[in-house]
Amino acid sequence: TGAGRVRTERIENVMGSQAGAGSSDFHIYRRHRRTEANRLDRMDREWEAQTADEEHAARVDAKKRECEERTAKNAAKRRKKKEAKAKRDAIHKGTGGAGPAFEDDGSFLERAKAMAAKAKAGDESKP
């Protein structure tokens, strides 16, 4: 017999009633009953294990999906916060988000005077 094959036992002298049964028939009946009960118990255990595995896999998938959603939400919040900080810093530097108009090297006053003089000269040349 192989590992996966079911072993059957052929009973040739089957009695129709207990009155005519031989002395060994009860032991054969008891063995068959025990074998069938063991088979049914094994089937029940396998079914319970399979359903438990499926439920566990469903819980793991749900938890994984929930974690991914939470991670995406937090990443969006971080990105939004970073963009707001960049915009706030740009406004603070006076560029309105278009890049730095003046470097932070201490030459702001000189450049502002030069720009004002240039604008004034441009206004005077126009009629």
Image: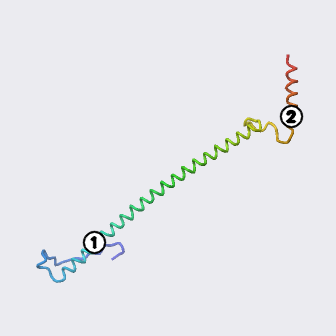
Q: Is residue 102 left or right of residue 19?
A: right
Q: Is residue 39 left or right of residue 103?
A: left
Residue 117, by quadrant, is top right
Q: Earlier in the sequence, mark 1 or mark 2?
A: 1
Q: Residue furthest bottom?
A: 23
Position in image of residue 72 (x %, y %): 57, 48
Disc 2 on helix, strand or loop? helix
Pick the front one: 34 or 95: 95
Q: Which residue, given by chain and number where applicable, does mark 2 sit on?
A: 111
Q: In the rendered structure, which amino acid carries the disc numbered 2? A: Arg
**Residue, x 79% and y 36% (percent of image)?**
101
**Residue, x 87% and y 20% (percent of image)?**
124
- The span from disc 1 to disc 2 (Cα, nearest Å) is 97 Å
Q: Residue furthest left?
A: 19
Q: In the rendered structure, which amino acid carries the disc numbered 1? A: Ala
Give neighbour class at mark 2: few <14, some 14-19, many 20+ (Cα, 10 Å): few
Q: Which residue, given by chain and number where applicable, does mark 1 sit on?
A: 37
How many labels, in total? 2
Pick the front one: 20 or 9: 20
Residue 25, by quadrant, is bottom left
Give neighbour class at mark 1: few <14, some 14-19, many 20+ (Cα, 10 Å): few
Q: Is residue 10 above or below residue 71?
A: below
Position in image of residue 127 (x %, y %): 85, 16
Numbered circle sitting on residue 103:
none
Is there CB contact under 8 Å for labels 1 and 2?
A: no
